[in-house]
Image (tube, rainbow, N blue to C red):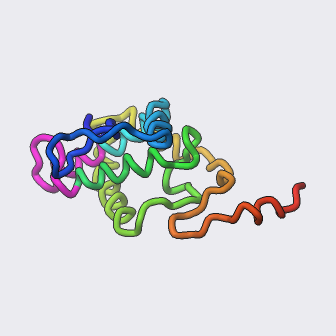
Amino acid sequence: MAALDLAQSAGPGGSGTMPAMGKHAEERRARLATPRLARELKTIEVMLRIGCRDRHGTAVGLCEDCAALSDYAVRRLAGCPYGAEKPTCANCQIHCYGPREREQVREMMRYAGPRMMLRHPYLALMHVIDGRRPAPPKPRGASRPGEPKPAASALLSTPKR
């Protein structure tokens, strides 16, 4: 799947490859290799394919809008501060999707979710089970996009318990 390869880009240059990735990009890409995040990525991609095929009439792959949403989801999932302990987005304390993208995913899940039980029962069941797991505590230093990160001096002056 093209969405799994963060080293590739379908940019206007046409070559499809990016220069060597930095250390942080490699770490984010490695997160997607964990079984839990790989399954979550596959679930969202399957839901997008179901919705795109049925609603947009796309026979193969994804339409441009759905492909952009898939790429966005891959970037968000790869950068999740929870890593392999990531809760489902509905249970997460850190909402990293923008309002527009969050609504697009909600619409897609409302449509594709019930259809997942017939087409991909294992992924649907695991998504339900994952949704029932309690969210782990918010990772230290993680903040919502747009919130200022705490200054190092503020972290040092916090009394320890």
Towards the viewer: 123 or 159: 159
Report how many numbered discs are placed on residues in the image: 0
What residue sits 65% from the left and 48% below the top?
136
Q: Which of the two residues, 86 or 75, is positioned nearer the viewer here?
A: 75
Residue 158 placed where, x, y %? 83, 62
Q: Position of residue 99 (x, y in %)?
A: 40, 69
Where residue 116 sits, quadrant-wise, is top left
Is 45 left, or right, of 58 in this rendering? right
Q: Main secondary structure of the magenta part?
A: helix
> Where is the C terminus found, in terms of image quarters?
bottom right
Among all residues in the image, which is located at the extreme front? Answer: 19
- Percent position (x, y) of residue 112? 29, 50
Query: Residue at 39% across / 40% down in the picture?
Result: 41
Residue 14 is situated, as x and y percent measured from the top left of the image, at 14, 44
Q: Residue at 30% across / 46% down in the picture? A: 47
Image point (16%, 52%), residue name: 12
- Magenta highlight range: 46-65
Q: Compared to 76, does 116 lie above or below?
A: above
The answer to whether residue 125 is visible is no
